Structure formats: C-alpha cells, structure tokens
Image (cartoon, rainbow, N blue to C red):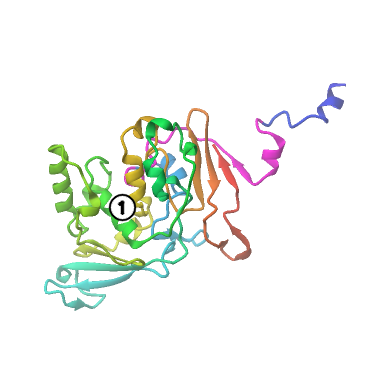
Amino acid sequence: MVFALSGCQERVNSPYPSAAVAGKTLFSSFSERPKHLDPARAYSSNEIEFIGQIYEPPLQYHFLKRPYELEPLTLTAMPRLTLLDREGRVLPPNAPAAKVAHSVYELHLRDDIRYQPHPAFVPAMHAVAPHTVERLDDFSQRASRGVTAADYVHQIKRLADPRLSSPIYGVMREYILGLDKLGDRLATQHQKGEPINLEAESLPGAVAVDARTLRITLKGRYPQFLYWLAMPFFAPIPPEVEHFYARPGMAEKNLSIDWQPVGSGPFFLSENDPNRVMRLTRNPNYRIEHYPGRPDLRLPLLDQAVY
C-alpha cells in the first residue's frame, strides 16, 4: 500500500515543488554567504559566483576555448593599445618597456548593453522617502537605460574611494594614470568629513571620449591589465544608482549596491536573504546572445537560479 501511494505523490526526495523543478531553474547552494556584492569590493569566489552573473566588465574568457582566451564581452572588439614615450610620440608595439611612458587602451562599447530594470533609473523614485519602504520591491516604478563609457569611468574612480576599501586599489594606483592622486584627495576629504562627489573628480587615466568610447591610460607597460578587464572590478556602475542608495535611511534597510547590485548581465539578484534563499532571475533587458556554436540556444539558458 505504501508503494502504491508513493507513486501518486510529488517527488519525496525534492525540497522544491514539482512545477519549479520542471521549469528552467537551477537549484544549488553556497557554503559561505557572500560578504560583498559591490564590484569594487567583492573578491572571493563565493562572491564572484553571484556577481559574475550580474555585472559585465569589458572582457570575458571564451566559454569553450582551452587554453583560456580573452574576448570582448561588452565591447565591439578587443581594446586597441597605443604605446607612447615621454614626449607623447607613438612607439611600435615591440618597443622596449624602458621607453614606454604610457600605455593607452581604447575601448569601444556595443550599443545594445542595457541595465536591469531598477527604481534608480526613475527620477521620481529618488523622491520616495526611505522610511516608507522596506524592500526594493516597495518602489512602484522601474526603468532602465543603456550602459555608457562614463559608467565605466565612474567605477574606476570608485576603486579609489576610501569608503569602499577596494582590495585592488593598491595595485591599480601604481598603473592607472592619476588614480593615486585621486585616492589621496578622496582620503583627505574623507578624513575631514567632507562629502565625496566622484562625478566632480577628474581622472586622466580613465576618460569617456564619447558615450561609447572609453580610454584608459596606464603608466608604463602592463600587458597583464587586459586580464583585469575581465574581472567585475571593471564593470560599469551608474552614478544614479549610487545616488539612489546613498540617501539617509537606505543602508539601514540593506538597500545598497553591496546588497542589491545593479548590472547589465544575464541575471539580476531578485531575492537576497542569505539565511534562507538567494535568487538570480533572468534580466529581461539582456541582449540577444547565443551559446558558442549553437545559434539555436539563446542565453541565458535558465530563467532563474536558486541558492
């Protein structure tokens, strides 16, 4: 009798409803809750597991090729490198490192990269009093916009923000032109209790030439920099998202980039309760991409991932 009845029930060894199991949902788990989801701060593998699906740096590794090979992610082509001497004259690609004063990378963005829907892109939502909401879902409107070169510049500036303590700032200040001076200025402002406005700060090593062109200038020659461009540290952050979360009362309700990230990747974090569940949901604004060699398989292959 027990065996007969068991055939009429849902799967007894599954903690999830049959409808959810039948859909395009990945069920997984994590051994340690992520400490940071802000791309300027996150560095651990358990954090990259999540933000790697949310944020999009300029480059990525080809999914199938071995050995690993870099390719454009949000760019139309690989970055173009120009080497300059101390007088600003162009050097040949094989110039000795001792003669290279600056390495200039020019990056051209695709025009179909858009952020996930979010209240920060609706000006009226910035006027909603934080004490009237508890969750991001309490904001009544959402919108989106395209990713711009200025968003990438903003994120590079964020690496020098003393309030974030980015783990790669110490390395990047040695290479990105002007990042050391920017960091020193911001540290002084922070120590004096003065407000920090990254948009008002200049950074010669990261310039938005136009809406789709980003120029990054390094001191000397540093070919390994391309590999950094495949990490979330160099993913774009819209300034209006920072403004939205910076309002008094938001952080106390875990409404911050570090808890509710905003990106242009294939998924967005729709639920963040590490003690119960973390849910990644398909970004409805994600562009048309296909699995390598399979034009019939549009990415992402999943509707959601539940951890």
Which quadrant does the N terminus fall into?
Answer: top right
- The residue depicted at 43 percent of the width and 60 percent of the height is 146
Identify which residue, 27 or 23, lies in the foreground: 23
Residue 145: x and y in percent read: 43, 57
Give, as a three-letter code, the residue at label 1. Gln
| In the displayed structure image, the side of residue 170 where residue 247 appears, left or right | right
| Residue 135 located left or right of residue 36 | right
Camera-side residue of 30 and 143: 143
Residue 219 location (% of width, % of height) = 18, 62
Quick check: 14 above or below 74?
above
Indicate the quadrant where residue 178 lies: bottom left
Looking at the rendered structure, the secondary structure element under dot 1 is helix
Query: In the displayed structure, does residue 22 sit left or right of residue 220?
Result: right
Question: Which residue in the protein does label 1 denote?
Answer: 155
Q: Which residues are magenta?
A: 15-41
Q: Is residue 133 magenta?
A: no
Residue drawn where x is 38% and y is 35% of the image? 129
Please say if 18 is above or below 107: above
35 up-or-down from 231: above or below? above
Q: Quadrant of the C terminus?
A: top right
Residue 45 lies, in percent from the top left, at 42, 42
Q: In the picture provided, is 61 more to the left or to the right than 246? A: right
Asked whether residue 105 is in view, the answer is yes
